[in-house]
Amino acid sequence: MSTMAEISQNDHASIGARMRSVLDRQKQAHIREGAPSLALRIDRIDRAIGVLVDHKDEICEALRQDFGHRSIDQTLMTDVVGCLGGLKEAKKNLRKWMRPSKRSATFPFNLAGGKARVEYQPLGTVGLITPWNFPMAMTFSPLAGIFAAGNRLMLKPSEYTPRTAELTERMFASAFDETEVAVFPGGPDVGQLFSSLPFDHMIFIGATAVGKHIMRAASENLTPVTLELGGKSPTIIGNNCQLQTAADRIMYGKTVNAGQICLAPDYVFVAKHSEGAFVASAERSVSSMYPALKDNPDYTSVINQRHYDRLQGYLTDAKSKGARIVEINPANEDFSQQPAHKIPPTLVLDVTEDMKIAQEEIFGPLLMVKTYETTDEVIDYVNAHPRPLALYYFGDDEGEKQRVLDRTTSGGAAINDVMLHVAQEDLPFGGVGASGMGAYHGFDGFKNFSHAKAVFEQGRRFDLGRFMRPPFTPRMRKILNTQAKR
């Protein structure tokens, strides 16, 4: 009789063998069929649009259940409608994107009729590992570029949203052959097997710590990676700022999906004399959006007990080290008894660097509020920490705004709002340093998931290359010496 360990090992081997078999079949199909035509790429994009639209109600319900509670309207906005824009953008521009890019042939080859161009070829099979916070958005947003570039997809969804993962598998199976798209739900063991496969490209969206493991696994196969990670995205409230407007936009970014967003503001820098005014503005903002929280269908739960405990631990640690905690609870509700894991939006003031909340990505409805005397002080603080996925600046001082943009480095930035740069399909989206590498969206996504093949076509006017072949003559040496100059 087999032991549980043996059964587990057998299952492990079986899953690994199946994933490798699917990858082999996808690669064989890619070689056999060659680069897909414009029509086939558009057809795949259309099918992706179709499964999103046809399953929108199931998507909303699956995510509501996986979270304990998640706003149905928010899911429709972020995980359905928000994905359609990128797919439609790719479909609209694909013919233009696929054209070879003309380049200039270098002198003297251009004089002999030489031509240079870049042709964009499909890579083959892309492996995609998605997170739990926006599982559909983080699948279909990069999928626009993956399909536009002519690739096939293998997908590993998060185990934290099992109903959504199962639905994702059914959705793709209803519209795609397994040689086009294959989905592999499962836990960390499945993810480990998945990341070790020799994909032609791999994209991981999630935590920085896990991204390091993904990159290490990919290196064994020299698989290029796109990593969209997180970090502590700063928000700077500068001079001449409409404070209530800024608070409205910041607190929206901190409360949508209960702050469980890689782009959510992690901490806010506000001038010392404006700290109290900002706290009051934040309280008004939350009260306007959520007059009550506990049973409000618009306010999302923390995903599970583990993350609920993590966030509560940040508050306990900060309070024990001298932080002031401002819980924004408009209806003064008791959250000790609830069916889900809701946490009211909470401001943490007087933060010190030894607090856990100052050291780790928050990923929840908690917001650090820090004060400053000068803008240079803020810039120095941002630059002393790992490069964030996003940076946000509020203010109408053009000089200050440009100084912040020029002297800080982040994956992206938004001015007088938060997160909305990710909604611009013609802008690349990605991180830098600890917040990731590579980018997708629009033409940048098409290029990211393509091989840019350099092509030089020799001219027919005369054989310029004969001057470069031995035996080298005095005339050739004279020409070289003529060119060897500053």
Image (tube, rainbow, N blue to C red):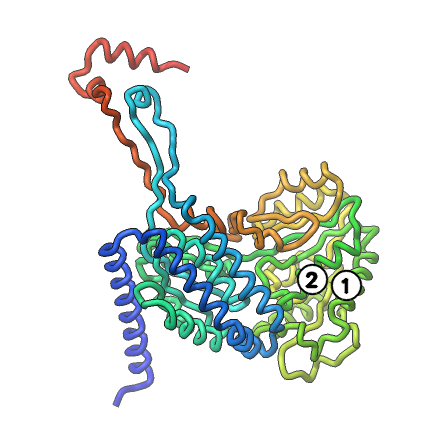
Residue assigned mark 2: 252
- Residue 16 placement (x, y as % from top left): 30, 70
Residue named by callout 1? 285
Q: From the top left corner, tell me how far across and down residue 159 is, in percent.
A: 46, 73
Front residue of 67/274: it is: 67
Which residue is depicted at the point 70% across and 65% down? 318
Q: Identify the amino acid type marked 1.
A: Ser
307 or 406, nearer to the observer: 406
**Residue at screen point 23% across, 59% down:** 28
**Quadrant where the image shows the C terminus:** top left
C-alpha distance separating marks 2 and 1 = 8 Å
Residue 109 sits above or below residue 241 on the image = above
**Marks 2 and 1: CB-CB under 8 Å?**
yes
As displayed, is residue 476 above or below residue 73? above
Secondary structure at badge 2 equals helix
Labelled disc at residue 204: none
SS assignment at label 1: helix
Q: Residues within 10 Å of mark 1 (few under 14, many from 20)?
A: many
Horizontal and vertical percent for residue 351? 72, 59
